[in-house]
Image (spheres, rainbow, N blue to C red):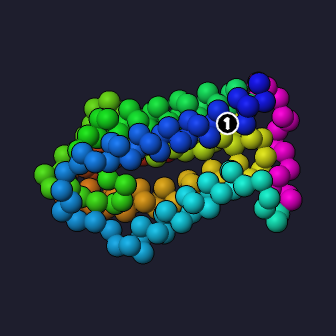
């Protein structure tokens, strides 16, 4: 049973990464992409967040303090949130189809997708990832998990803002209307 608690959430993340790499092969040609420095400005924090969640020996003991007690219920609630978040991100990736990119990119003949999860939030992949990080933090129960989630939020918010500018440039009024009608990350909140 100990093995399940140690490996279930990492295995979910590994499976998600595997799917992401396979799905990345079938995309449209790129018309415009962000610079390497810009990409590193959101990839770097994501790597820091992943290290915070997975490292067993960081030199800051306060990060290992618990914000919630270690219980089976907490672990399983966190694991369920991870699974739901990753599934939501995959669902969004499926609906985005060949318009997807891991970087801030405009594709040739880029389309504005408003169906599936895109009818509830404009950036459902980010929503799913944020929930998956939050679920990981809950299952872990340590402050380093919440710090990792905050870092991911800041990195994705920065990336989201750049994407919104670019989409606004190519879709104009249509994208402005979409922004008014659909929240960025969390229905009814943000």
Question: What is the magenta range?
Answer: 61-74
Residue 32 sits above or below residue 77 on the image? below
Q: Is 155 placed above or below 95 here?
A: below
Counting from the top left corner in percent of width and height, residue 46 is at: 55, 58
Residue 48: image location, x then y, percent:
62, 61
The residue positioned 43% from the left and 60% from the top of the image is 159
Mark 1, residue position? 7
In this rendering, is residue 127 above or below 38? above
Is 118 situated left or right of 55 in this image? left
Which of these two is toward me, 159 or 119?
159
**Res. 98 image quadrant:** top left
Packing grade of label 1 (10 A; few <14, some 14-19, many >=20) is few
Report the front residue among 125 and 60.
60
Q: Is residue 73 magenta?
A: yes
Q: Secondary structure at mark 1?
A: helix
Residue 41 lies left or right of residue 102; in this view the side is: right
């Amino acid at each position: 049973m100990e093995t399940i608690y140690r490996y279930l959430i990492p295995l979910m993340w590994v499976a998600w990464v595997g799917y992401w790499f396979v799905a990345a092969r079938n995309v449209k040609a790129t018309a415009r992409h962000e610079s390497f420095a810009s990409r590193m400005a959101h990839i770097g924090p994501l790597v820091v967040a992943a290290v915070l969640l997975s490292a067993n020996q960081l030199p800051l003991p306060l990060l290992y303090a618990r914000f919630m007690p270690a219980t089976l219920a907490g672990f399983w609630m966190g694991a369920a949130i991870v699974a739901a978040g990753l599934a939501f991100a995959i669902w969004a990736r499926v609906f985005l189809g060949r318009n997807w990119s891991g970087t801030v990119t405009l594709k040739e003949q880029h389309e504005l997708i408003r169906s599936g999860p895109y009818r509830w939030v404009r950036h459902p992949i980010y929503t799913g990832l944020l929930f998956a990080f939050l679920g990981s933090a809950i299952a872990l129960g340590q402050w380093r998990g919440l710090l990792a989630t905050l870092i991911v939020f800041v990195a994705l918010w920065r990336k989201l803002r750049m994407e919104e500018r670019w989409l606004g440039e190519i879709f104009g009024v249509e994208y402005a209307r979409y922004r008014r009608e659909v929240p960025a990350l969390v229905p009814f909140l943000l």
